[in-house]
Each structure stands twice: as structure tokens, then as C-alpha cells.
Image (spheres, rainbow, N blue to C red):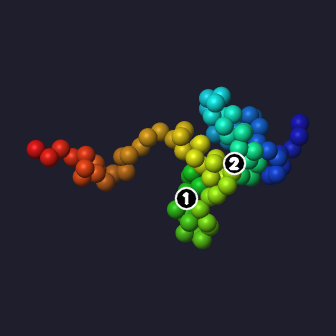
Amino acid sequence: MASLSGSQRITRDDVIKAIGSADDVTIAQLIATGATVDELAEAQAWMANDEPLMNSGRPLATGRVRELVDILAELEPEDDDDGRGAPASSISQE
């Protein structure tokens, strides 16, 4: 078994290890970016904690990492419940 190198392009196994279950199309999209294991890890870091990364002066994700973030964002459940209530535009005006 080959050891994982940061410059190795991601494989199906890498994707499954990193994000758990995903459909074949999503896995194929991630692999098709040509991203490396390090880039996948960076994309996951952005998904988990974008604010601390920005606060530490890191530029926003670009290139393949940005592609990965966009694909991974599609896997996130829609969660508009941030505790601040509904936006004014969606509150019924009766």
C-alpha cells in the first residue's frame, strides 16, 4: 500500500476517508478537479472554519481548493437556522 503524500492526486478512497459517504457523481467531481490530498484537506479546513482562516490573514480559497469547497458545499445540509430568526423579507406582513 502506497503511503499518502501531500502531492498525490486524490483517489476515491481518499475522498471516502475524508468526507465519508458521498454519491458517485460527487466523488467523480472531486477527483476530476485534479486536486491533491493536501488541497482536499485545505478545502475541508475552509468548510469547517473559514472565519479563523480569514482572521489569520489567509487569502480566500482559490483554484482547485475553491473548486473543492464549492463541491463540498453542495454536500452540506441547507441550514438557515442560525438563531437570528427569519429574515424580514420572509416574515408575513398581515
Residue marked by disc 1: 50
Side (left or right) of 80 relative to 56: left
Query: How far from the left and from the top, in percent, is residue 65?
Result: 66, 52
Instruction: Tell which of 53 and 24 is nearer to you.
Output: 24
Q: Amino acid at mark 1?
A: Asp
- Residue for point 69% across, 34% down: 28
Side (left or right) of 79 relative to 85: right
Q: Amino acid at mark 2?
A: Leu
Residue marked by disc 2: 40
26 is higher (above) or lower (below) than 36: above
- Residue for point 14% across, 46% down: 93
Query: How far from the left and from the top, in percent, is residue 83?
Result: 33, 51
Disc 1 to disc 2, C-alpha distance: 14 Å
Query: How far from the left and from the top, in percent, is residue 70?
Result: 58, 47
- Residue for point 66% across, 37% down: 29
- Quarter of the view holding residue 15: top right
Does the image show residue 73? Answer: yes
Q: Secondary structure at mark 2?
A: helix
- Residue for point 86% across, 44% down: 3
Would you say the residues marked 1 and 2 are in contact, meaning their CB atoms lie under 8 Å apart? no
